[in-house]
Amino acid sequence: MTEKTEQKKFEILNQFIKDLSFEAPNSPQIFFEKIEEKPNIEISFEIKAVPSGENLFESNLHLTVKNSLKDRVLYLVELSYSAMIAVNKDNSKEENTEILMKKVPSYLFPFARSVVTDLTKDSGFPPFVLAPIDFSKVEAKKPEEVKPANAN
């Protein structure tokens, strides 16, 4: 009697903050003003995946959060949260696209959200908690085709 086991389609080898920027150009004055209007919050994200070796990819979730009052920026957060991903060599390109552009960002998002929340709180503003994103419903592009640095 043999037991059939499904091979792993991918493995997250590590995850890390690749780039982080925080700006509060109108502080500390803004902390002492009475604010009666509702701030305008703009949120955007981008997902990229680039080859980083044989069956290895770097998957990157880039978030931008801009909180402003009329023409004054309260704060601007830019975060690139990444992971190194090993994919099964038998995966199809379509499977890898699904993994790198939908599944992996779903794993990374809670960590990136925590960074944004802690950063805004630690900067003197009320903690900003990003709403969950259903990456399975986000239109995905194929991972970038990047030549190794030594290729002509």
Image: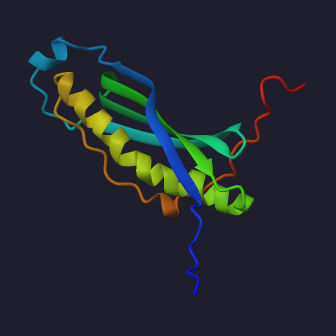
Q: Tell me what residue is drawn at x 71 percent, y 42 percent.
A: 144
Direction bottom: furthest residue: 1
Q: Is residue 62 visible?
A: no
Residue 30 vertical position relative to residue 144 in the rendered view, above or below: above
Q: Position of residue 80 (x, y in %)?
A: 47, 32
Q: Tell me what residue is drawn at x 48 percent, y 49 percent.
A: 105
Q: Tell me what residue is drawn at x 59 percent, y 61 percent.
A: 9
Quarter of the image where the C terminus is located:
top right
Q: Position of residue 97 (x, y in %)?
A: 65, 56
Lateral position of residue 35 relative to residue 63, left or right = left
Residue 95 vertical position relative to residue 78 in the rendered view, above or below: below
Q: Is residue 38 visible?
A: yes
Viewer-nearest residue: 8 or 24: 8
Lateral position of residue 5 relative to residue 66, left or right = right
The picture quadrant where one finds residue 3 is: bottom right
Q: Position of residue 142 (x, y in %)?
A: 69, 51
